[in-house]
Image: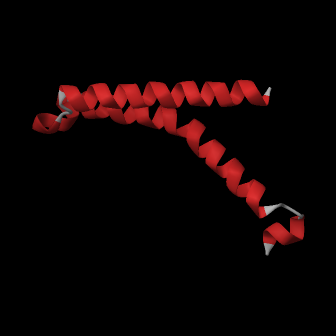
């Protein structure tokens, strides 16, 4: 109802919320990987080498996608 009152297109709002979510995900992934790799914080439940590598690769891909998106918008 609020979207209708202010004249906001709900589809555009969904698209922009997905864009914001994708950009914000990169620093959150970095923080989670750093926390998961910390022996003091995680004890014996630290990330294995394979999980750590795949996590950093996924973070790099997400970061490149976010940068590419922001460059296309400018």
Of residues 39 and 60, the one nearer the viewer is 60
Colour approach in the figure:
secondary structure
Q: Position of residue 55 (x, y in %)?
A: 34, 31
Q: Is residue 57 left or right of residue 1?
A: left
Total numbered badges shown on the rendered structure: 0
Where's the C terminus, which quadrant? top right
**Residue at far left of view:** 44
Q: Is residue 4 left or right of residue 14?
A: right
Q: Is residue 32 above or below residue 71?
A: below
Q: Position of residue 25 (x, y in %)?
A: 51, 39
Of residues 38 and 17, the one nearer the viewer is 17
Question: Toward which corner of the image does residue 71 lie, by quadrant?
Answer: top right
Q: Is residue 29 left or right of residue 71?
A: left
Residue at 15% from the left image edge and 39% from the top image edge: 45
Residue at 85% from the left image edge and 71% from the top image edge: 4
Where's the N terminus, which quadrant? bottom right
Tell me if residue 32 can be seen. yes
Question: Toward which corner of the image does residue 30 lie, by quadrant?
Answer: top left
Residue at 53% from the left image edge and 27% from the top image edge: 63
Question: Toward which corner of the image does residue 56 lie, by quadrant?
Answer: top left
Q: Is residue 1 above or below residue 73?
A: below
Residue at 77% from the left image edge and 54% from the top image edge: 12
Q: Position of residue 28 (x, y in %)?
A: 46, 37
Tell me if residue 30 can be seen. no
Q: Is residue 17 above or below residue 63?
A: below
Q: Position of residue 16 (x, y in %)?
A: 71, 48
């Amino acid at each position: 109802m609020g979207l209708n009152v202010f004249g906001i297109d709900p589809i555009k709002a969904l698209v922009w919320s997905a864009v914001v979510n994708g950009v914000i995900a990169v620093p959150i992934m970095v923080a989670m990987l750093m926390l998961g790799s910390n022996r003091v914080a995680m004890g014996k439940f630290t990330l294995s080498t394979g999980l750590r590598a795949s996590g950093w690769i996924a973070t790099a891909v997400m970061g490149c996608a976010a940068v590419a998106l922001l460059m296309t918008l400018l």
